[in-house]
Amino acid sequence: MKKWKLIGLIILLQACSADMSFDLKAPQSLIFAADVNREGGKLDRLFFEGGLLRISRFQLDGDRVEAEDYFFQNGYTPAMEIPLDSLAYPSLQFDLPQGIYNSIRLQFEIPSANIPTLIIVGRFQDSTGLWVPLRLEVDSFELFNILALDPYGDQEIVIEEGSSYYGLLRLNPQHWFASVRTEQLEAAQRISISGQSTILITRSVNAEIFTEVDNRLDELNSLTIF
């Protein structure tokens, strides 16, 4: 009897192994979108609502369990413009080989330029209760490194046949501004932009706030692959 149980167990394990088999060379579509963390911060007085990202290099590096690692890199001249609106961006659609990935890491660059290569827009409620537009502009080279996670927060990601995948890059300006005090935003210089008095934060305008934010740009951003 024990012999037949052992044979049955072996057959069951072989069947399970077959179900988890992959055509490790067959690619599946992965399309990216980008957004910002839209949750409120600073006692719900600071919100971010979108912006624009200009990238000059985009790189994916995947560590697969049973096959060769995956590496992809693309450069863009001029820099590619990506709206931070959570919508799938067709120019950032790639083929990702099937398999179980121990990790997938995204690296991208924004170039130094005479125009902003990262723009974040939001709003801040001042002490009078008025909501004031806020705009962050970065025009210097920045390198971002992000470890991809699945929707459950695990870094092991399974890419299977017959599925299309969606990678949501989410920048985290709430964290970037975490060390900026509300008093600094209250006292910040305001500039008229499109007829609206706006808290503009650049290397030369409200420079103290900019420095605090710039030091955190590559922190706590996320990439979720669905």
Image (cartoon, rainbow, N blue to C red):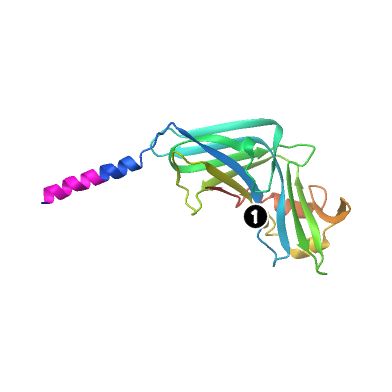
Report the residue at 76% width, 55% height from top: 209
90 left or right of 208? left
The residue sitting at the left extreme is 1
Q: Please tell me whether residue 161 belongs to the stretch shown in magenta.
A: no
From the top left corner, tell me how far across and down residue 156 is, in percent. Answer: 45, 47
Report the residue at 76% width, 36% height from top: 113
**Which quadrant of the figure has residue 185?**
bottom right
Q: What element does badge 1 sit on?
A: loop
Report the residue at 64% width, 53% height from top: 172
| Residue of label 1 | 37
15 left or right of 217? left
Q: Please tell me whether residue 3 belongs to the stretch shown in magenta.
A: yes
> Mark 1 is on which residue type?
Asn
SS assignment for the magenta stretch, majority: helix
70 left or right of 178? left
Considering depth in this image, is 174 or 19 the residue closer to the camera? 19
In the rendered image, the vertical position of residue 214 relative to residue 42, given as above or below? above
Highlighted range, magenta:
2-12
Considering depth in this image, is 60 or 163 the residue closer to the camera? 163
The residue sitting at the front extreme is 162
Report the residue at 87% width, 53% height from top: 191
**Which quadrant of the figure has residue 22?**
top left
Classify mark 1: residues with Cα within 10 Å, few (<14), some (14-19) or many (20+).
Answer: some
From the top left corner, tell me how far across and down residue 69 is, in percent. Answer: 45, 34
In the rendered image, the vertical position of residue 103 relative to residue 130, given as above or below? above
From the top left corner, tell me how far across and down residue 58 is, in percent. Answer: 61, 36
